[in-house]
Amino acid sequence: MSTETSSATDVAITNTKIALTDVAATKVAALLLQEGRDDLSLRVAVQPGGCSGLRYQLYFDDRTLDGDTMTEYGAAKVKVVTDKMSTPYLMGATIDFVDTIEKQGFTIDNPNAGGSCACGDSFS
């Protein structure tokens, strides 16, 4: 996480964006192409639930809600949206896509997660 300090106001400015790797952006773009929709964004949300108390939700959404944060990634201009309640939990998180013999899917590396359960689907 990068932090800059402004000498005029002594305010710390922290990187609050989610990072989407190029591999993940390419996969999202391919899924959107399969759907035949270019009006959808990847919404990343944090919801109560799971073994550790909180869980991630990733889904395509055509809505924009009050307080949403939207960022575009990659050559395909993939849009990632978070709601105002989820944003603090996701600051500095990196979303990647893995495709190995053992695992396929999106992963979230979140520096704000204090712990996670064995299934890897929830965090605290």
Image: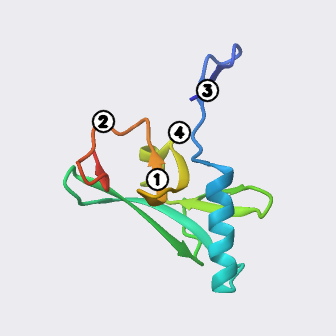
Give the number of the disc on residue 92.
4
Q: Disc 1 marks which residue?
A: 107
Colour scheme used in the picture?
rainbow
Q: CA distance from mark 4 to mark 1?
A: 14 Å
**75 is higher (above) or lower (below) than 30:** above
Q: Can the viewer see residue 68?
A: no
C-beta proximity under 8 Å, tags 1 and 3: no
| Position of residue 46 measured from the top left corner of the image (x, y, whole percent) | 38, 57
Which of the two labelled residues, at mark 4 and mark 1, occupies the earlier sequence position?
4
Q: Dot 2, how many residues are within 10 Å of its Cα: few (below 14), some (14-19), or many (20+)?
A: few
Give amino acid for label 2.
Gly
Question: Mark 1, mark 2: which one is toward the viewer?
Answer: 1
Q: CA distance from mark 3 to mark 2?
A: 20 Å
Residue at 22%, 52% in the rendered image: 53
Quadrant in which the N terminus is drawn: top right
Q: CA distance from mark 2 to mark 4?
A: 14 Å
Quadrant of the rendered structure where residue 121 is? bottom left
Q: Can the viewer see residue 82?
A: yes
Q: Disc 3 marks which residue?
A: 2
Residue sitting farthest toward the front: 101
Which of the two labelled residues, at mark 1 and mark 2, occupies the earlier sequence position?
1
